[in-house]
Image: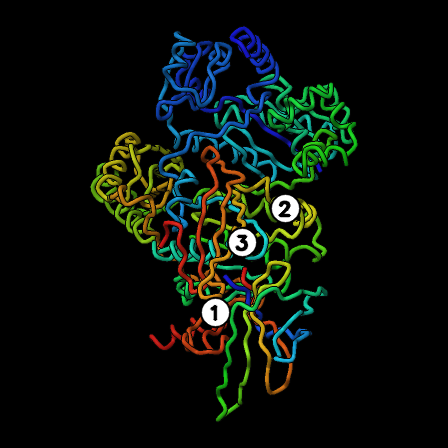
C-alpha cells in the first residue's frame, strides 16, 4: 500500500543537469537516491489549469520507495507518495 | 478509591452443588465438550485441572461426579450476582464467572461502615443467589482480588487505606500474573515473595521483563491504576403483553404464548440473531410475579421452538390466579451461523446501519472527521483526480433523500 | 524432569492451590483452538493456515507491525476486502490522514462502503475507535500507533482507552487491527509506542512483517516479497514464517486472491 498526502509535500531536491533527483530533504533527513526505478511525464489539463510534471519512482538509501514529481511550470519538487 | 472484590470460586461447580445439595463434600467435575470446564476443590486435590480431558479426570478421581456444563444457567446466575453488587454501587466490573468488582468509594463513611456493607452484600448474595463468596476491600483492583483470595469462604478481608504494599509483601510470587518463565527467572535470582519483587529497581525490571513485567512490578508494590470497566448487560430481545381484564392460565396458554414468541422471533431475525435462553415472567392480580426459564439445546430463531418453550414455561408457572402481564425475554443471543460449515465460518452478518452509527459520533467529534471514498476517474494519470474523500454523513443523507 | 520430580512439583502445586486457590499458579497455556472461532480470512491461504484459526480473530485485537514497505498496510486492506465480500462493514481510523484510496481500490476494497475516520488528534482517534469497536463492524483498522507518540497523551488515558476497546470488542464481532510502524529496534520495541500504550498485553495476535526483496520488472520496482512472522497467537501454537508477495498494481500473491 502507499501513503499519500492530501496535499503533496514540498521537498528540497538536489538534481543533476538532466533534472534527475540525486538526493532529497524530507522530514529533517537527507535521503540519497540509490535508484530511479521509473520516470514518466504528465502534461494535461492545458485547456483549463495546465499540469506539467515529471514523475520519478525512486529508491532511497533508507530503503524507502517513493514517488516524487518535478512541477515543470513552477520548478518545485513534491513528494507524492511513499510505498508502505 | 476503595474497591470491593467479590469472589465465588469454582462458580459452575458451586451452582451445581447449590441445585443438588447431595453433591456437597463430593468431588464434582463440570464437563464441556469432553474437557473439564471447572471442578470442586476435592477434585482439584486429586489432580483434576481445568482444560484436562474428562477421561483423564475420571481416572485421577474415580469418585468424581461429572455434570454437563449449562453455560446459559451459569451466565444467568452470574447476572444475578452482578445485580447484587449493582445494588451497592453503579460501577460494577464483571470478570470471569464468580469474579466481580465494585467501586465503593463514597458509599460508606468509614472503615467500620465498610465492614457492615460487606456483611450486607454477603447476606444478599445468599438470599438472591444461594451462594457464599469471599470479599476483599482495598485501594485498588489487584490488591482487593488478592485479599479476597486469601480469606476463607464466607468472610471478607478489608485493608486499611495505604496498607496495600505491606499486605502483599509476604505473599508468594505465584499470586501475580507472571508467566512461568518469569517466575523461574525470579526464583533463580532468589526472589520468592511479592515484597522481594517489589523492592527490585523499576528500571531493572523493565529491562529484564519489558513493559508487562514493569506493570506486574507495580502490582506487587500495591499500585494498580486500572479503572473499573462498567459491566454491560448482555443484549436481550423481549416482548410484553398486558391483559385487561386479567386472564386465566388456560387463556394465556391459548392466546399469549404464541404471539409473544412470534414478536420476539421477528426481532431476532431482523437482527440476524438467535437465542438460547427463554425467560417468562407472569404478573398476577395480587401484585406478585413469578418467573421461569429454560435453556434450549441449541441457538435458534425458530418461532415454533421458542413458542414450545414458552408454553412449557407457562405450564410450569400454572396456578389459579389471574394474570395481568406476561413478559417473554430471549437471552443468550448470538449471531446466526451459516448452515454450510464446509464453506468456512464466515457468517452472513446483519447489515450495520453505518449512518446511524456515525451520526452521534459526527455530532460529538464533528462531521469533518468521517469520510467515504468516491471513484472519480480510476484511469486518470493524476493520482489526485482518481478518487476523492467525501464527508460521510452528508453523502449518505443525500442518497437517502434522493431515494425518497 | 523425571517422573519423581513431576510428582513432587504436582504436590507443591496442589498444596499452593489448596492454600491460595486454583489461581495461585498461573499457567500461560494456550487454550485448545476452538473450531468455530469467528474470524476474517486474510486472503493468503498459507498465512490463514499458519494462524491456526483461518484468519484474523473477530472480537479481538490484532497488531500488524513492521517498518515502512513491509506489507502491513497492504495486508490490512486485503482483510477488509475479505470482510466486505462476506457482508461485513469496515472502518479505517486514519490518524495520519495519508490513506491511499487508489491503492485500497486496487486491493478490491469497496470504497463506498468503507468508513474512513480522520480524527483531529490521538485522543479523538482512540475515543472514536472505542465507539466503533462496539458497533458491530466486521473490521476496524487503527492506522497507526506510532502517530500517537508525541501527542502528549497520558499513560493512564492510553491504558484506559485500550482496556475499554478490549472490553467492547469482547461483545462485538469486530476484528480490530492496529498498525504499528517500527522505527526503533526490533518489532515490539517499546520505543515505537507512546508510554502507557501496552498494546502487547491486549493483543490476541501479533504479526511482524518485513520486506525481503524487491520484485523488479524491466528495471522498475513492481512489488516486493515480505515475510510474516507470528510473534503472538492466543489461539494456536506458533507457526513458521510465511512468505507473501505484494505488487503495486494491487494484486497480491502468496496463495491469495
Q: Chain of mark 3?
A: C
- Left of B389 or right of it: where is C200? right
Label 1 – label 2 distance at C-alpha: 28 Å
Query: What residue is disc 2 on?
Result: C160
The nearer-to-camera label among 2 and 3 is 3
Give yes or no for contact between labels 2 and 3 (Cβ–Cβ under 8 Å).
Answer: no
Q: Residue at x 35, y 22 (%)?
A: B34
- Badge 3 local density, few (<14 within 10 Å), some, or many (20+)? many
Query: What residue is disc 3 on?
Result: C70
**Quick check: B110 above or below B401?**
above
Front-most of residues A24 and B66: A24
Whether marks 1 and 2 lie on the same chain: no
Image spot of residue A65 (x, y percent): 56, 63
Label 2 – label 3 distance at C-alpha: 30 Å
- Badge 2 local density, few (<14 within 10 Å), some, or many (20+)? some
Front-most of residues B259 and B249: B259
Give yes or no for contact between labels 1 and 2 (Cβ–Cβ under 8 Å).
Answer: no
- Circle 1: element type: helix
Between discs 2 and 3, the one toward the N terminus: 3
- Which residue, as the protein is rendered here, is positioned at the far bottom? A47
Mark number for residue B53? none
Quadrant that contains the C terminus of chain A: bottom right
- Circle 3: element type: loop
**Quick check: B140 above or below B67?**
below
Front-most of residues B77 and C241: C241
Q: Chain of mark 1?
A: B
* Quarter of the image where one finds residue C23: top right
Give yes or no for contact between labels 3 and 1 (Cβ–Cβ under 8 Å).
Answer: no
**Quick check: B354 above or below B248?**
below
Front-most of residues C39 and B297: C39
Mark number for residue B392? 1
Amino acid at each position: 500500500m502507499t501513503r499519500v498526502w492530501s496535499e503533496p509535500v514540498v521537498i528540497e531536491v538536489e538534481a543533476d543537469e538532466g533534472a534527475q533527483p540525486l538526493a532529497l530533504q524530507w522530514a529533517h533527513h537527507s535521503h540519497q537516491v540509490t535508484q530511479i526505478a521509473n520516470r514518466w511525464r504528465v502534461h494535461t489539463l492545458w485547456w483549463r489549469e495546465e499540469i506539467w510534471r515529471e514523475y520519478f519512482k525512486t529508491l532511497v538509501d533508507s530503503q524507502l520507495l517513493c514517488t516524487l514529481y518535478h512541477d515543470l511550470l513552477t520548478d518545485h519538487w513534491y513528494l507524492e507518495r511513499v510505498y508502505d | 478509591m476503595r474497591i470491593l472484590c467479590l469472589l465465588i470460586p469454582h462458580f459452575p461447580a458451586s451452582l451445581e452443588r447449590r441445585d443438588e445439595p447431595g453433591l456437597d463434600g463430593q468431588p464434582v467435575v463440570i464437563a464441556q465438550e469432553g474437557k473439564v470446564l471447572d471442578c470442586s476443590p476435592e477434585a482439584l486435590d486429586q489432580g483434576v485441572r481445568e482444560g484436562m480431558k474428562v477421561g483423564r479426570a475420571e481416572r485421577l478421581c474415580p469418585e468424581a461426579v461429572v455434570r454437563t456444563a449449562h453455560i446459559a444457567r451459569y451466565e444467568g446466575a452470574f447476572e444475578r450476582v452482578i445485580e447484587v453488587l449493582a445494588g451497592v454501587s453503579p460501577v460494577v466490573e464483571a470478570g470471569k464467572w464468580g469474579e466481580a468488582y465494585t467501586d465503593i468509594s463514597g458509599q460508606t463513611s468509614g472503615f467500620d461502615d465498610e465492614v457492615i456493607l460487606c456483611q450486607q452484600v454477603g447476606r444478599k448474595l445468599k438470599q438472591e443467589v444461594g451462594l457464599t463468596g469471599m470479599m476483599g476491600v482495598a485501594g485498588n483492583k489487584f490488591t482487593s482480588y488478592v485479599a479476597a483470595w486469601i480469606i476463607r469462604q464466607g468472610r471478607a478481608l478489608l485493608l486499611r487505606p495505604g496498607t496495600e504494599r505491606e499486605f502483599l509483601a509476604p505473599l508468594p510470587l505465584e499470586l501475580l500474573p507472571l508467566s512461568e518463565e518469569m517466575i523461574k527467572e525470579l526464583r533463580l535470582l532468589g526472589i520468592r515473595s511479592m515484597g522481594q519483587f517489589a523492592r527490585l529497581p523499576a528500571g531493572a525490571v523493565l529491562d529484564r521483563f519489558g513493559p508487562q513485567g514493569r506493570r506486574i512490578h507495580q502490582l506487587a508494590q500495591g499500585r494498580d491504576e486500572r479503572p473499573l470497566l462498567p459491566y454491560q448487560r448482555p443484549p436481550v430481545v423481549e416482548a410484553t403483553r398486558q391483559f385487561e381484564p386479567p386472564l386465566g392460565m388456560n387463556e394465556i396458554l391459548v392466546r399469549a404464548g404464541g404471539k409473544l414468541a412470534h414478536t420476539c422471533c421477528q426481532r431476532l431475525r431482523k437482527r440476524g440473531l438467535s437465542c438460547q435462553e427463554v425467560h417468562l415472567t407472569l404478573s398476577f392480580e395480587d401484585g406478585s410475579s413469578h418467573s421461569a426459564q429454560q435453556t434450549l439445546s441449541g441457538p435458534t430463531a425458530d418461532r415454533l421452538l421458542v413458542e414450545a418453550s414458552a408454553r412449557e414455561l407457562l405450564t410450569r408457572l400454572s396456578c389459579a390466579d389471574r394474570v395481568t402481564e406476561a413478559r417473554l425475554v430471549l437471552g443468550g443471543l448470538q449471531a446466526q451461523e451459516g448452515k454450510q460449515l464446509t464453506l468456512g465460518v464466515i457468517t452472513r452478518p446483519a447489515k450495520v446501519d453505518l449512518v446511524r452509527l456515525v451520526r452521534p459520533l459526527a455530532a460529538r467529534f464533528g462531521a469533518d472527521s468521517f469520510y467515504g471514498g468516491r471513484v472519480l476517474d480510476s484511469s486518470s494519470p493524476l493520482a489526485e483526480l482518481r478518487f476523492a474523500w467525501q464527508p460521510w454523513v452528508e453523502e449518505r443523507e443525500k442518497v437517502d433523500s434522493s431515494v425518497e | 524432569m523425571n517422573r519423581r520430580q513431576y510428582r513432587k512439583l504436582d504436590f507443591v502445586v496442589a498444596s499452593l492451590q489448596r492454600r491460595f486457590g486454583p489461581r495461585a499458579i498461573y499457567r500461560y497455556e494456550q487454550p485448545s483452538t476452538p473450531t468455530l472461532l469467528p474470524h476474517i480470512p486474510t486472503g493468503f491461504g498459507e498465512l490463514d493456515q499458519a494462524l491456526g484459526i483461518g484468519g484474523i480473530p473477530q472480537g479481538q485485537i490484532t497488531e500488524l507491525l513492521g517498518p515502512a514497505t513491509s506489507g502491513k498496510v497492504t495486508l490490512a486492506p486485503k482483510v477488509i476486502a475479505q470482510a466486505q465480500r462476506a457482508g461485513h462493514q469496515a472502518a479505517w481510523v486514519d490518524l495520519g490522514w495519508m490513506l491511499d484510496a487508489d491503492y485500497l481500490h486496487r486491493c478490491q476494497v469497496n470504497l463506498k462502503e468503507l468508513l474512513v475516520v480522520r480524527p483531529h488528534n490521538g485522543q479523538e482517534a482512540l475515543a472514536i475507535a472505542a465507539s466503533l469497536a462496539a458497533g458491530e463492524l466486521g473490521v476496524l483498522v487503527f492506522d497507526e500507533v506510532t502517530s500517537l507518540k508525541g501527542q502528549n497523551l497520558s499513560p493512564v488515558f492510553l491504558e484506559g482507552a485500550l482496556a475499554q476497546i478490549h472490553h467492547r470488542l469482547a461483545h462485538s464481532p469486530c476484528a480490530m487491527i492496529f498498525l504499528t510502524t517500527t522505527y526503533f529496534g526490533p518489532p515490539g520495541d517499546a520505543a515505537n509506542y507512546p508510554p502507557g500504550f501496552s498494546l502487547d498485553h491486549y493483543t490476541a495476535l501479533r504479526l511482524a512483517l518485513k520486506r525481503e526483496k524487491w520484485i523488479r520488472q524491466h528495471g522498475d520496482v513492481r512489488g516486493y516479497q515480505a515475510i510474516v512472522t507470528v510473534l503472538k497467537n492466543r489461539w494456536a501454537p506458533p507457526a513458521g514464517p510465511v512468505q507473501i508477495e505484494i505488487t503495486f498494481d494491487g494484486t497480491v500473491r502468496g496463495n491469495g486472491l
